[in-house]
Amino acid sequence: MEYSRFKMPSPAGLALSAAIALVGLVGALAALSPKEQPFKPTWNSLRNVHTPQWLRDGKFGIYTHWGVYAVPAQGPNATWFANKVYWDPTSAERKYWEQTWGPLQKFGYKDFIPMFTGEKFDADAWADLFQKAGARFAGPVAEHHDGFSMWDTKYSEWNAAKMGPKRDIVGELARAIKKRGMKFVTAFHHAEQWVYFPTSDASLDCGDPRFSGLYGPIHQRGERPTKAFLDIWAGKVVEVIDKYDPDLIWFDNGLELIPDWTKMGVLAYFYNKAVERNKEVVVTYKRHDLVPGAGLLDLERGQEADLTYYDWITDTTVDNGRGWGYVKGLGFKTVDNLIDNLVDRVSKNGYLLLNVGPKPDGTIPDEARELLLGMGVWLKTNGEAIYGTTPWVVAGEGPTRLEPGTAGFNERNDLSYTSQDIRFTVKDNTLYAIVLDWPGEKLLIKSLAPRWQSWTGWNGLYSAEIVSVTMLGDGQELKWENTPAGLLIETPKKRPGDYAYVFRIVRKNPF
């Protein structure tokens, strides 16, 4: 393949880009008057941010892992396939690569870019699907660990506007998603570009300075990121903020590689820009990569086991493993699983960001599409118990429990929730009891028993405060009795839908 046509920047050009990144960030912060800078680049100041009301209300969003890694489409994790190939010459991944595409010394990751065509990519079709799924916020991974930017960036020629699809994917999705009233998400994984490829190996293309714009600067394993790398990292985030005005910036693992000063500067810029634009924004992070309170904690493929005092978000994917990007032959979750886990997260003070991995041509796999549409059908009937709600004083009851996780990773796709598994949300004077399987002719909600309960305290309902009980999708008033064992409800004769069933309990102040 002829790479001269890519017009790779010279080392001097890369240095200039780094300088532009630093001057751009520092200059932008300095240009704001003190009155316009409620957020300073210090952790003390950045902890004054709060979760936007649109996220508190919206609960559910969708993002996409779509990039060059969709071409090999190999798992178990598509986005880390190349990393395994490059770093481990004895791996099954390297063997598969060389059997399929030839020796790594002759066919590198960059050679997939012409196959990443995106000829069927339709931002409006994606946005329509996400809206029909019931998502209230959505957007793409702007850049993954592989160094390939999905927008028209001035910092690298290795981007989707100049190569592969030759389209500004982030820009097109920003317009399509915002046009439909959803908040816009951009996800950044590019901090780990520093460790993703073995750039010190001169026998591979990642060790060739001509390709450092994609693979990252050449350095020895264990070295700390250079100032030039950090400046470009920050510059790319700021550029997306300026050009596409995201509402949520999601950061993957790797922020631990970025020094405080750089992270604080980027966050202050984003938060101050939001004030200037008169909008609420949020940044998510993993583990302790930011100071608590400076953003929203994200739990990868996990969820809290119990109701929490703080709110949080979790990212998971529609596939049945951890593919993230499109993987050939990978199975998918069920609508029932996705609904149950959305409900469980919301009841415990969490939000859900659900991933979809499109194919190289830009189409979303049929299985993923059907799952999203299935969620949308359920939310159209039952979204009242999700959107605009808050957790109640008890998250739920029932025999099916998750074990606590460490920074997430406790998601269970093999759990089978039962008709005794109930989760609660509340909005104004309405309490929603969401049963995760059909309860049969009657439902007993033990947590609502009008008595002291040693494990929760007093959480029951007075009979005098219950105005009515109905099921969403049915609407007819149901017979109920407040017994010492709990609130006993007669269910409708006919199921109004599938998966999970919402009892709408309207209350009044009895005093």
Image (cartoon, grey):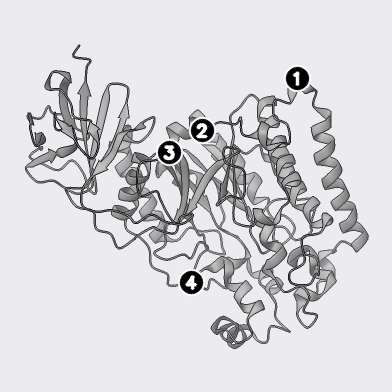
User: N-terminal of the two: label 4 or label 2?
Assistant: 4
The circle drawn on residue 180 is none
> Is tag 4's residue or tag 1's residue first in the polypeptide sequence?
1
Q: Is residue 170 visible?
A: yes
Mark 1 Cα-neighbour bin, 10 Å: few <14, some 14–19, many ≥20? few
Q: Position of residue 315 (x, y in %)?
A: 48, 51
| Image position, residue 214 (x, y; %) | 75, 65
To which residue does mark 3 refer?
59
SS for callout 2: loop
Say what amino acid the circle numbered 3 marks.
Lys
State the residue in front, 9 or 161. 9
Residue under circle 2?
A: 181
Q: Amino acid at mark 1?
A: Lys
In primary-sequence order, the first of circles 3 and 1 is 1
Tag 3 and tag 2, C-beta contact below 8 Å: no
Q: Position of residue 48 (x, y in %)?
A: 61, 30
Vertical placement of residue 81 versus 43, above or below: below
The N terminus is located in which quarter? bottom right
- In the rendered structure, which amino acid carries the disc numbered 2? Gly
Nearer the observer: mark 3 or 1; the answer is: 1
Residue at x 37%, y 45% (from the top left corner): 345
| Residue pointed to by mark 1 | 35
Give the CA distance from mark 1 to mark 2.
30 Å
CB atoms of marks 4 and 1 within 8 Å: no
**Above-or-below relation of 310 to 105:** above
Q: Is residue 164 left or right of residue 448?
A: right
Q: Nearer the viewer, mark 3 or mark 2?
A: 3
10 Å crowding of disc 4: few (<14), some (14-19), many (20+)? some
* Residue on which disc 4 sits: 76
Three-letter amino acid code at the position of disc 4: Pro
